[in-house]
Image (cartoon, rainbow, N blue to C red):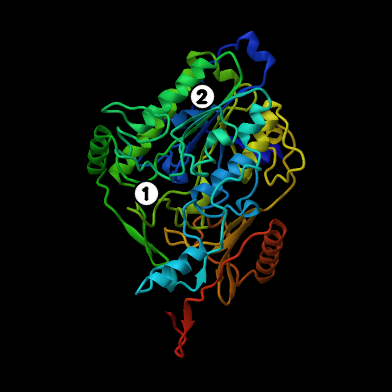
């Protein structure tokens, strides 16, 4: 079973010769470095897409040194829910943290309608989004709390977006918080450049946010080299606003011209979707993030810590392709951020642990962001919280040559209208099959895809496979009931006219 899931990659052996760890390291669990990108698509990295317009040499090198997951998924097509799942090992539907924190609640939509003379966007929609919890509850046990209880120093830098005052990283198990706040993007005075306007992050003219976050992470690692640590570096990159380092922007403008690339567009629902990677500013943002990640990885080598550090690289949702500048293309994957198609939820993912995980391998086992906490707990020997239902599974046994976990489905629940054009719905992946649902006032409609034969989800096979479609739809419905998933409701602001068309009250 293991050989069927992890296959050797036909890539050069670029892994360095890892130094012997200090004796003190042998008596403790490994360090943990989490590198989390924001809005980075599956096709935005070279290790998934050798023809990518963007250059990611640091992450590509990391992939040759560890295990690359070809079927890694975010638990949600937008950021906060996935981040909550990664922190807790629990599904956003179970926590009711199903939309990005700050999205309008249904009651706020109704209240706003009373104050408006003309109907707004939400008043024209047939369903009100489900209510959601807009912070990570304190009673949830986080990765930081699990590792801190095992004696780890814990550090967070970058995008938090899991709650504001009273719910920042230091209330959720992190000893240090740099730049983490309630905001979903770098919306300070200088955006990605000085001044940042973020907590505990100083800057000077010329400073660039990805590099400064890397500086803070490096300083933490250097100061804790003799004790076990968790360094959670959560880049704001490559979230909007779209602004890049000028030298890199110019480099990619020249590259675009040299390659003769031009924008090309398709259609996803009522949205344009970018089909070609050629956005110079976005490319510059990817490159700067990759450069910053590389600097943090390099310090592990310099301090002889690489051998005893588990590194995880992941992204919180798919690339932004249907809205807000449409900066990237996820093609051949369908759609992008905010959608339940593959472009919105399949993520670039690498895990490296020298001496434990075989370098230059690929794991085809479908995994989800809920799996990281139990896997990292197993790697470090930390105890999982008692009496807590974990939706994730421990992957370390499989990755080190043992049996694969029992077959399972991967579930999604997004009962909201995405800013990027996605509609309320859910999804279930079982083996190569994926069932995608749309919630409507008259019921649920579904589509069925075979992801091995049709990774772009172009051919709906629900008509040809009615029994499979019905069975997967039933299992998805049962799962929603088990986790207490909240559902959207008919919009009382919309009524049907005699011609069968909806209009706002």
Residue 328: which disc? 1
Most extreme residue toward the bottom is 498
Looking at the picture, how far across and down is residue 25, in whole percent? Answer: 63, 14
Q: Residue at 38%, 63% (x, y): give it.
A: 271
Residue depicted at x 65% and y 40%? 5
Q: For the N terminus, which image quadrant?
A: top right
Q: Residue at x 55, y 33 (%)?
A: 170
Q: Position of residue 350 (x, y in %)?
A: 54, 35
Q: Position of residue 313 (x, y in %)?
A: 52, 35
- In the depicted view, which residue is nearer to us: 481 or 339? 481
Q: Are marks 2 and 1 in contact (CB under 8 Å)?
A: no
Q: Which residue is mark 2?
A: 13
- Kindly tell me whether residue 224 is visible in this rendering: yes
Task: Identify which residue, 442 or 193, lies in the foreground.
Answer: 193
Q: Nearer the viewer, mark 2 or mark 1?
A: 1
In terms of depth relative to the viewer, which is nearer, 303 or 259? 303
Q: Secondary structure at mark 1?
A: loop
């Amino acid at each position: 079973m293991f050989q069927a899931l992890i296959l050797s990659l036909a890539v050069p052996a670029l892994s360095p010769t890892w130094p012997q760890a200090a004796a003190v390291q042998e008596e403790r669990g490994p360090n943990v470095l989490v590198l989390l990108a924001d809005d980075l698509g599956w096709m935005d990295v070279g290790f998934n897409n050798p023809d990518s317009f963007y250059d990611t040499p640091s992450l590509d090198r990391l992939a040759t040194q560890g295990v690359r997951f070809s079927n890694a998924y975010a638990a949600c097509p937008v950021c906060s829910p996935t981040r909550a799942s990664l922190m807790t090992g629990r599904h956003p539907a179970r926590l009711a943290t199903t939309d990005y924190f700050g999205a309008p609640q249904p009651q706020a939509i109704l209240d706003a309608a009373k104050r408006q003379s003309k109907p707004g966007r939400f008043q024209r929609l047939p369903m009100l989004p489900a209510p959601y919890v807009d912070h990570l509850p304190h009673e949830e046990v986080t990765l930081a709390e699990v590792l801190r209880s095992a004696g780890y120093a814990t550090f967070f830098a970058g995008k938090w977006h899991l709650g504001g005052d009273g719910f920042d990283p230091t209330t959720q198990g992190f000893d240090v918080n740099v730049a983490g706040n309630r905001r979903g993007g770098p919306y300070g005075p200088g955006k990605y450049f000085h001044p940042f306007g973020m907590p505990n992050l100083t800057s000077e003219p010329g400073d660039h946010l990805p590099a400064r976050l890397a500086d803070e992470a490096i300083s933490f690692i250097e100061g804790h080299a003799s004790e076990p640590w968790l360094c959670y570096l959560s880049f704001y990159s490559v979230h909007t606003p779209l602004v890049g380092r000028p030298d890199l922007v110019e480099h990619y403008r020249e590259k675009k011209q040299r390659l003769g690339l031009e924008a090309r567009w398709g259609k996803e629902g009522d949205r344009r979707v970018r089909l070609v990677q050629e956005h110079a500013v976005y490319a510059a943002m990817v490159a700067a993030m990759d450069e910053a990640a590389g600097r943090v990885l390099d310090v592990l080598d310099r301090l002889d810590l690489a051998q005893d550090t588990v590194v995880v690289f992941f992204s919180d949702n798919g690339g932004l392709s249907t809205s807000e500048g449409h900066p990237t293309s996820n093609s051949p994957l369908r759609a992008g951020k905010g959608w339940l198609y593959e472009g919105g939820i399949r993520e670039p993912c690498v895990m490296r642990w020298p001496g434990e995980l075989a370098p230059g391998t690929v794991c085809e086992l479908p995994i989800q962001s809920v799996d990281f906490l139990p896997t990292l707990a197993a790697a470090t020997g930390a105890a999982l919280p008692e009496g807590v239902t974990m939706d994730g599974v421990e992957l370390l046994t499989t990755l080190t040559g043992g049996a694969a976990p029992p077959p399972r489905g991967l579930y999604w629940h997004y009962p909201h209208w995405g800013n990027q054009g996605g509609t309320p719905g859910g999804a279930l992946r079982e083996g190569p099959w994926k069932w995608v649902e749309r919630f409507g006032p008259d019921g649920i409609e579904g589509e069925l895809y075979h992801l091995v034969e049709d990774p772009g989800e172009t051919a709906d096979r629900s008509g040809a496979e009615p029994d499979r479609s019905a069975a997967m739809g039933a299992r998805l419905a049962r799962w929603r009931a088990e986790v207490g998933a909240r559902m959207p409701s008919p919009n009382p602001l919309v009524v049907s006219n005699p011609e069968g068309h909806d209009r706002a009250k």
